Amino acid sequence: MKLRKYLGKFVSAAAALLTAVSLAGCAMTERDEIEVTREAEVPPHMLFLGDSIAAGYGLDGYTSEDNYSCPSYSNLLFEQYKAELPEEAVPTMINKAVSGATSADLLGMIESGELDRELKESDAVVVSIGGNDLLDILYKLFDSVGYSPENSSFSLDDLDLFSAASVLYGMGSEADEAIAGFSENLKAIAAGIHERTDAVLYIQTLYDPLEYYSYIPLAADFSSEKISDFNSVVRENAAAGLSDYRIADVFEKFTNRSADLTNMADFDIHPNAEGHKVIASVVDSAFRDTGFTYTVTEPGEEHLTQQAKAIIIGGIAALLLVIIIAAFAAGRKKGNTSQK
């Protein structure tokens, strides 16, 4: 009976010690921060580059120093995505488009490194560029078909078709050279962007603003041909794998809608507010065809700290020691009893 009582005390002490160790261990747990990837239909971080179309020229609220206060397609998409994406995605939009920029200008910006940070932090890069490569030629075209900048009208009565046709022939070669230069710049732009970011790149096609002047076939046909050549460069480079980008086909959605979607009635080739809504829908569709992911940091599974593990191991060792001591004491007690 005394032996049982003796062992009981040891077992009780060991149990108390193990309980204390366990409680100490429970109070010393932690959670490591882990990165979790989530899917999204649209990009949380957007970067818009290019010319006056991307900048929002001509819209209410636009200034050459501010691309963020007008209803441009970049701003429309950002407002839409802020409401759509969860807060944890932390949506952002940067617009570095510059009115008047040519493809050579954009290439220079990229190669200078001034866009490196913005490119690195982007999930999608959208580029509208090339229209200004052809713009001077289009203005010469207007001169050749009798456009009067004083009253923003055409004098068809004084139009010399033979002279106009001769001018157009010369401008055709000039336009072809401009398109060839654009093709080389576009490849370099795409390569430069991909050297600096893992973002998905989108290149917009160019709509034909001069379809508005269908009653002047010389101008409308020339513009249609050269815009078609321009867009062929965009499409063929992508299809041939010469440049790793996707196409936002603005041209398709603007065809036969120049009067409704641009300011050509005021001799302004830029999209109006409705036109920007259409471009936003084109870019949005291109985004959703791609799909995106974003990364968030959240607590992982709860686990013991190193200190807690040390305490528990020490407690187990102490318990084993108690058991060994108890067994040894019991053995001695039994031996003594036998000798008696």
Image: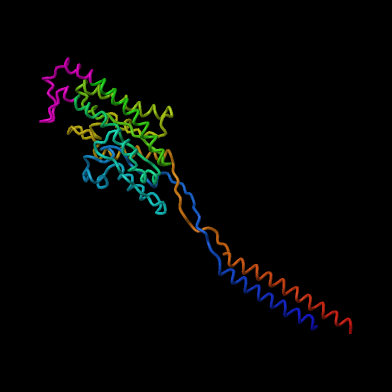
283 to the left or right of 209: right
Give the quadrant of the N terminus: bottom right
Q: Position of residue 214 (x, y in %)?
A: 22, 24
Q: Position of residue 196 (x, y in %)?
A: 40, 41
* Image position of 109 with respect to 9: above or below: above
> Which of the 4 image quadrants contains residue 324?
bottom right
> Which of the 4 image quadrants contains residue 23?
bottom right
* Image position of 26 with respect to 285: above or below: below
**Residue for point 66% across, 76% down:** 16
Residue lying at the far top in this picture: please name it. 162
Q: Which residues are magenta?
A: 142-170
Q: Position of residue 107 (x, y in %)?
A: 32, 35
**Residue for point 74% across, 79% down:** 8
Residue lying at the far front in this picture: please name it. 112
330 to the left or right of 295: right
**Residue for point 69% across, 70% down:** 317
* Image position of 50 with respect to 214: above or below: below
Q: Position of residue 231 (x, y in %)?
A: 33, 28
270 to the left or right of 146: right
- Which of 323/110 is in front? 110
- Which of 286/295 is in front? 295
